[in-house]
Image: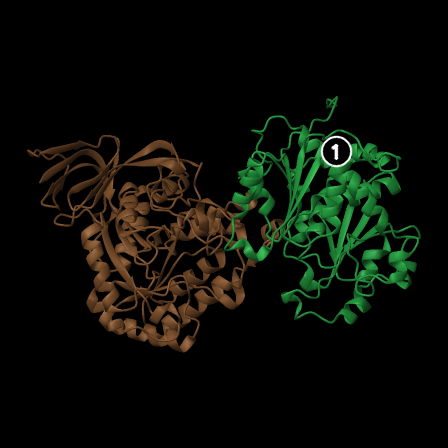
Chain colours: A brown, B green
């Protein structure tokens, strides 16, 4: 199977490419990339005035399988990914049971092989049952193929256990993804603590509950020499702490999610439970700090934190509703709308954040259009506007914080290992 | 500036005073004046809501507010149905939205809802086409209580603009405080909130109020005080000083009132805890309007029921941006 993508603006920061070029794909790999390629292929895609970039590598996705197939499955989630231009996902381990043993991971790999529509990488749990008490067999998980470990959804509260985990991870050359939240501070809060929580009459989640734990995680990373990655950074203080740590040479990377630079706590004034997210939407000032962190490299990656929940878990009283928003189908457009259109990031910087850097953090051979690499490519109409509608979402859950929002930037083609897995009419 | 000829009510629901304009509130208060007169007549009934059904849907125990709404609806000739629901059934039983849709299917016209979760009334209002009146949601708002407080104050003093009103007590967990703040500040009243620091919610000064933890300061220039009920049975009150200590430092006593304006108006949303936040002498004394508030509450609720029932276009969305 051969295909050629012609006349698109190719963005490939790994090879410092940003220009109109042709790409030839053969046997699932990128075989040639040049100004003009003349080749006979079954498929020719005209990408004039379109962006051609590596597929998104989303390093924070909840696929819910096994255990909560009512919310999402490997099949439904990876279809949503393909529609959103995401060709690789990191499946987080807070499934039921959690991804804490080789047995469960073996089974999951089998499901992935049979049903996944994009590349699914696996994040193993740090502790058994993600309970923060007993380390998993990190070496065995690594052998089984996990590319990172995390207790995502929870932080490992006990310093000693966290330190042991970091030492073990360092030995196994695995990055530890930190859900940095001090539960003793965030308690039963549901929105950012401050004027908005007061106005809504809801319990607040302080920023301290996040950045105190970011600080601790960084200190322990420094002590152990392990590489850590801070998930879903939401506030200015965390950005500053990470900035300083990077300067002093700690092996720390960080991600944020599109909602943290596009929405703020004031969007919650109508009690929209789809915007109930953990960590919570913060202030306008925090969104500026997040974009600042993206621009100067403090924040390495954009990841969706795709968190599907059923209607019966969301269409209820705000304080009882689950935390999280789906994000696979909107992350590209929200980023184009909020970052590229507003000249906060260039296309090349954006591709680094959403594709190349996540691949580097996870040490997976993705996120580039280099010759010989897997042909994971997306074609994007950069100026095309569309409105997020609940009925258009193909994820099994429809809890998008962006429903009703007009966005710019539409995925036209998603190609995974040389195969067109999604295209618009 | 062109003056509006007649104020027009456009809200399907009454969710909170934050979402109303000064003119909306004025319309309710003015209408309540006429309804207040009816309550002193021999025949205390008008046919304004004849043929309409009002459902009181209460997820929290309440006597005063529920009875007040019931009396108000009956004075307007509406049929009233009371539903009391155990809030513990929230997780397993029928959802609030489903209950609301069922009430709608039973052809009721207005749901009066009291719920322990903030935002519950807004959610219900979004999910049914009939009117929803918030009778208190969590710590968020209790608009009819604030309306009756404002009605009482306006009746006593003649205006709200420029009045110094101090709200004393558990501000953090009080929907009465929030609704009063939104309402009073729209009329240019100067609102002070007074409580121990841990009961002052974060960022409250942005609602346009002065904050103090000194009761004498709160009383000094006040034209009126609104004394909130202290709920020592709350879980998060365990770290709090004793009832006795609270009374010593914040209790409204005759001694304290002596240092304030002579005609200071003392309000309380009830039920009062004698000797906890207010002394019996003050509660029953000449400055207290606590029982007048109860009577005025009927008139204000009649006005609210009347106006929401006048909204003809059921497509009018509720006033909170979603």
Q: Is residue A8 left or right of residue A62?
A: left
Q: What residue is rendered at 67% in x and 57% in y? A: B172
- Decide if residue B98 is in sight here: yes
- Decide if residue B163 is in sight here: no
| Number of callouts | 1
Residue at the limit of the structure toward the left, as seen here: A40
Residue corresponding to mark 1:
B77
Tell me the SS state at disc 1: loop
Q: Nearer the viewer, residue B69 or A179?
A: B69
Q: Residues within 10 Å of mark 1 (few under 14, many from 20)?
A: some
Q: Position of residue B322 (x, y in %)?
A: 53, 39
Q: Nearer the viewer, residue B195 or A71?
A: A71
Quadrant assignment, res B82 = top right
Q: Is residue B219 left or right of residue B118?
A: right
Q: Position of residue A51 (x, y in %)?
A: 26, 37
Q: Position of residue A105 (x, y in %)?
A: 24, 64
Q: Pick the quarter of the image with the N terminus of chain B.
A: top right
Q: Position of residue A267 (x, y in %)?
A: 52, 44
Q: What residue is rendered at 41% in x and 71% in y? A: A219
Q: Nearer the viewer, residue A337 or A370?
A: A337
Q: Chain of mark 1?
A: B
Q: Is residue A48 left or right of residue A177?
A: left
Q: Is residue A364 above or below residue B20?
A: below
């Amino acid at each position: 199977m051969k295909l050629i993508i012609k006349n698109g603006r190719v963005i490939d920061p790994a090879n410092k490419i940003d220009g109109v070029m042709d790409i030839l794909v053969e046997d699932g790999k990128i075989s040639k990339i040049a100004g003009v390629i003349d080749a006979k292929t079954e498929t020719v895609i005209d990408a004039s005035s379109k962006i051609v970039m590596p597929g998104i590598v989303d390093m924070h996705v909840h696929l819910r399988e096994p255990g909560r197939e009512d919310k999402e499955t490997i099949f439904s989630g990876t279809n949503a990914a393909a529609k959103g231009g995401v060709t690789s996902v990191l499946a987080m381990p807070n499934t039921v049971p959690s991804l804490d043993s080789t047995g469960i991971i073996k089974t999951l790999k089998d499901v992935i092989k049979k049903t996944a529509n994009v590349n699914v990488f696996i994040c193993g749990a740090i502790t058994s049952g993600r309970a923060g008490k007993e380390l998993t067999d990190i070496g065995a998980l690594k052998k089984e193929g996990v590319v990172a470990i995390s207790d995502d959804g929870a932080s490992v509260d006990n310093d000693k256990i966290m330190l042991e985990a970091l030492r073990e991870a360092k030995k196994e050359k695995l990055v530890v993804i930190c859900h940095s939240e001090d539960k003793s501070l965030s308690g039963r809060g549901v929105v950012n603590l401050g004027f908005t929580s007061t106005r809504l009459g809801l319990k607040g989640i302080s920023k301290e509950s996040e950045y105190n734990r970011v600080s601790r995680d960084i200190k322990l990373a420094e002590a152990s020499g392990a590489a850590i990655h801070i998930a879903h950074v939401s506030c200015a203080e965390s950005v500053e702490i990470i900035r300083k740590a990077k300067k002093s040479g700690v092996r720390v990377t960080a991600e944020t999610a599109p909602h943290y630079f596009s929405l703020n706590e004031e969007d919650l004034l109508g009690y929209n439970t789809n915007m109930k997210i953990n960590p919570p939407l913060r202030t306008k000032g925090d969104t500026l700090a997040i974009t600042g962190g993206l621009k100067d490299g403090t924040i390495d990656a954009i990841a969706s934190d795709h968190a599907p929940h059923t209607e019966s878990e969301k269409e209820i009283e705000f304080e009882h509703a689950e935390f999280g928003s789906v994000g696979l189908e909107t992350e590209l457009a929200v980023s184009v709308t909020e970052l590229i259109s507003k000249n906060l990031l260039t296309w090349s910087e954006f591709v680094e954040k959403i594709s190349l850097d996540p691949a580097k953090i996870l040490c997976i051979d993705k996120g580039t259009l280099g010759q010989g690499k897997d042909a994971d490519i997306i074609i994007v109409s950069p100026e095309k506007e569309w409105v997020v509608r609940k009925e258009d979402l193909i994820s099994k859950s429809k809890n998008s914080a962006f429903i009703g929002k007009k966005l710019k930037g539409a995925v036209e083609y998603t190609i995974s290992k040389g195969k067109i897995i999604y295209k618009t009419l | 500036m062109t003056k509006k000829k007649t104020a027009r009510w456009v809200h399907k629901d009454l969710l909170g005073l934050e979402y109303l304009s000064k003119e909306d509130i004025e319309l309710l208060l003015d209408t309540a004046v006429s309804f207040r007169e009816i309550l002193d007549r021999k025949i205390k009934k008008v046919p304004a809501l004849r043929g309409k059904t009002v459902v009181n849907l209460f997820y929290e125990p309440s006597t005063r507010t529920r009875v007040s709404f019931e009396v108000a609806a009956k004075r307007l000739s509406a049929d009233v149905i009371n539903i009391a629901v155990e809030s513990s059934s929230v997780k397993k039983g029928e959802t609030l939205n489903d209950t609301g849709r069922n009430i709608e299917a039973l052809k009721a016209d207005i749901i009066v809802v009291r719920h322990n979760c903030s935002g519950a009334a807004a959610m219900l209002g979004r999910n049914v086409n009939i009117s929803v009146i918030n009778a208190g949601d969590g710590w968020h708002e209790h608009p009819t209580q604030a309306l009756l407080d404002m009605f009482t104050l306006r009746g006593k003093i003649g205006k709200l603009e420029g009045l110094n009103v101090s709200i004393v007590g558990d501000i953090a967990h009080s929907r009465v405080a929030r609704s009063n703040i939104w309402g009073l500040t729209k009329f240019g009243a100067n609102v002070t909130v007074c409580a121990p620091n841990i009961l002052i919610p974060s960022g409250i000064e942005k609602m346009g109020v002065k904050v103090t933890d000194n009761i004498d300061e709160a009383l000094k220039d006040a034209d009126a005080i609104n004394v909130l009920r202290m709920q020592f049975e709350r879980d998060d009150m365990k770290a709090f000083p004793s009832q006795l200590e609270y009374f010593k430092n914040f209790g409204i006593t005759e001694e304290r009132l002596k240092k304030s304006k002579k005609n200071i108006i003392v309000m309380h949303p009830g039920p009062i805890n004698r000797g906890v936040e207010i002394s019996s002498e003050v509660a029953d004394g000449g400055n207290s309007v606590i029982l007048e508030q109860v009577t005025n509450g009927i008139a204000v609720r009649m006005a609210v029921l009347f106006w929401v029932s006048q909204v003809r276009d059921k497509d009018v969305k509720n006033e909170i941006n979603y």
